[in-house]
Amino acid sequence: MQGLLVAIDRFNTWIGQLFGWLALALTLFVSYEVFSRYVLGAPHAWSFDFMNMLYGGLFMMAGAYTLAKNGHVRGDVLYGFFPARLQASLDLALYILFFFPGVIAMFWAGYYYAAESWAINEHSNITADGPPIYPFKAIIPIAGFCLLLQGFVEVVRCIGCLREGKWPSREEDVEEVDVDKLKDMVHVKDEDIAQLDVYVTGQHKQAPQK
């Protein structure tokens, strides 16, 4: 099982790094288009569509990569102070209630959306001779599939954390909030967090009365 989880992590990392080059391609293309439009006086009607497809492809295919690196935005100011098991419980509930229904819908609807686009050889209608957009729409179900794979990995990580009391290790290459430094800044101790955990989980109500 661990080998499968690592393989999915590495696959989505490779996908994210590969599509990350679209950021460079987008920068170079925008620079060229500005030069062509204002210096050469030769703008391209299809440039807007092409830039949208580059950015959209980067945005969608970076989702699973960011999830694999635990880089999605969350309320770390509160979440980071919670014990690992409480974090895992919250994550697991959110994955089941929101993540999987949304991503499954994205994959399912995106598949038919892309299939229809390929069937009619769809081109952009923004300009008279717009570029083909069916390859771009094919990215939607692919991105959904990658997110589903990574979501499975994250659920297993949550279950492992609930069992062991600590998060399984992962390969980090993104800058996250340094919880220890944040604790020092706001003068919070581990004992305070433990008392908060007791209060949040309702354990104080179960304490025997004297």
Image: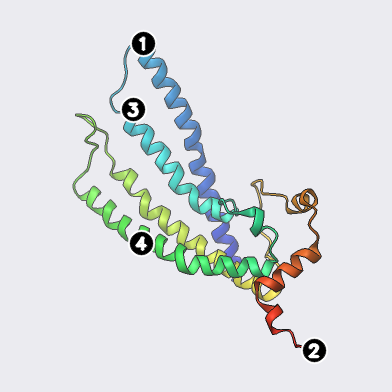
Q: Which residue is mark 2?
A: 210
Q: Which residue is mark 1?
A: 40
- The tally of labels here is 4
Residue 33 at x, y percent in the picture: 39, 21
Frontmost of labels 2 and 3 is 2
Q: Give, as a three-letter code, the residue at label 1.
A: Leu
Q: Give, as a three-letter code, the residue at label 4.
A: Ala
Q: Residue at x 53, y 51 (%)?
A: 65
Q: Give, as a three-letter code, the residue at label 3.
A: Ser
Q: Which residue is mark 4?
A: 105
Residue 206 falls in image quadrant: bottom right
- The crowd level at tag 2 (other Cα within 10 Å; few <14, some 14-19, many 20+) is few
Q: CA distance from mark 4 to mark 3?
A: 31 Å
**Which disc number belongs to residue 47?**
3
Q: Is residue 197 rendered to the left or right of residue 147?
A: right
Q: CA distance from mark 2 to mark 3?
A: 75 Å
Q: CA distance from mark 3 to mark 1?
A: 15 Å
Q: CA distance from mark 2 to mark 4?
A: 53 Å
Where is 46 relative to 21, above or below? Answer: above
Q: Is residue 106 rendered to the left or right of residue 31?
A: left
Look at the image and tell me whether residue 196 can be seen: yes
